[in-house]
Amino acid sequence: MRKRILTGDRPTGKLHLGHYVGSLLNRTKLQDDYETYVLIADVQALTDNFNTPEKVRQNVLEVAMDNLSVGVDPNKSNIYIQSLIPEVAELTVFYSNLVTISRLQRNPTVKTEIAQKKALFGEDGGSVTYGFLGYPVSQAADITAFNADLVPVGEDQLPLIEQCREIVRKFNSLYGNVLKEPQALVGEVARLKGLDGNTKMGKSLGNAIYLSDTDDETYEKIRNAVTDPKKIRKDDPADPYICMVGYYHSIFSKPEYEQVCEECKAGKRGCVDCKKQLAKNINSELAQIREKRRYYEQHQSEVKDILAQGTKNARIITSQTLRNVKEAMKIDYFK
């Protein structure tokens, strides 16, 4: 049997370059060799969008189209909707007894997201619901429902994978060797920085280039990217290593990167031309993705059929896992 991958995204908005280099590229590369399940985590998205469910509903389709556009093949991978997998909800309840509140509060990913909420919305934005605090448990249920061997994620998700591994070890120590302990796989770029210099590109931070952006939108965002503040005139030498344009060149302009840095340091490269070159390279890389996305935007019924079939296939796996878990916990009363 092939090993299994579980990966996915929260539908809180369209996917961006951070998702692309962090996990989407890995999905497309690995789907030929692994049995692949791609989760659209709408339940987890509701933990901080419970008052705008229509936003989550629309973004389910947006995230599905982004995955299909980058090359996730529905003939090789199953894209499914989290809320339509009731077994995950049951597993979440069972696992919640294996994790303390203090452990959830120490999770670095959760702590970071709470801090971001406070920075954006003040202290009231830091109010934490039970669902938000507990979403690492829900994510553990997602992964173990498929007994996934490998979980392609961005670097910021690593603490959540480790918490999942802890839950697996705790469950198996109590009830027998039922669940598989997953391994994380981080993309070539572990965490893509935002255009504003933030350590993470994020939808809520307003510093992202989306896969679905137009060429002009991409250039406009790059035009406003943070650069070396000491470079005032075109011919001033600058430090490309503290410039976000230089940083993005290192990822999307690899053949030219050394030349970019040398010219920048020597004052032979103006920021306007440098930004235009970067925008051209990014737009070139995303051109086929954007063309494919336009197809799916015009054929959304096809996208819904793909989601329905992927969800149906997913339930075959998760229902068997739940039966195994209930048997191990001695709560399979009428088997």
Image: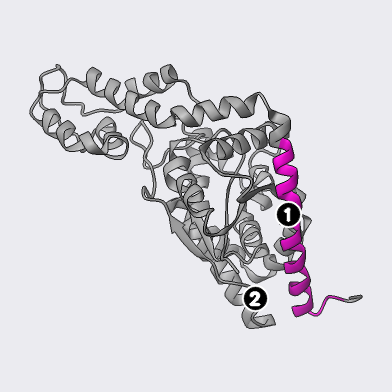
The CA distance from mark 1 to mark 2 is 26 Å
Figure check: 115 above or below 14: below
Query: At label 1, which amino acid type do we have?
Result: Asn
Q: Nearer the viewer, residue 192 or 147?
A: 147
Q: Where does the image place residue 243, in percent across and percent down from the top left?
A: 24, 32
Figure check: 101 above or below 295: below
* Residue 249 in magenta stretch: no
Residue at the left extreme of this rendering: 266
Image quadrant assignment for residue 59: top right
Residue at 34%, 24% (x, y): give it: 279
Figure check: 292 above or below 308: above
Residue at 53%, 54% (x, y): give it: 32
Residue at 18%, 31% (x, y): give it: 260
Residue 178 is marked as none
Q: Is residue 322 left or right of residue 147?
A: right
Mark 2: few/some/many CA within 10 Å (<14, 14-19, 20+): many
Q: Is residue 318 left or right of residue 59?
A: right
Q: Nearer the viewer, mark 1 or mark 2?
A: 1
Mark 1: few/some/many CA within 10 Å (<14, 14-19, 20+): some
Image quadrant assignment for residue 255: top left
Residue matched to label 2 = 171
Residue at 25%, 28% (x, y): give it: 227
Residue matched to label 1 = 313
Q: Do we see residue 51 in this rendering?
A: no
Q: Is residue 324 left or right of residue 104?
A: right
Q: Nearer the viewer, residue 229 or 55?
A: 55
Q: Where does the image place residue 131, in percent across and percent down from the top left?
A: 67, 51
Q: Which residues are magenta?
A: 304-332
Q: Where does the image place residue 252, in percent across and percent down from the top left?
A: 32, 36
Helix, strand or loop for disc 2: helix
Q: Do we see residue 171 in this rendering?
A: yes
Q: Where does the image place residue 112, in percent across and percent down from the top left?
A: 47, 48
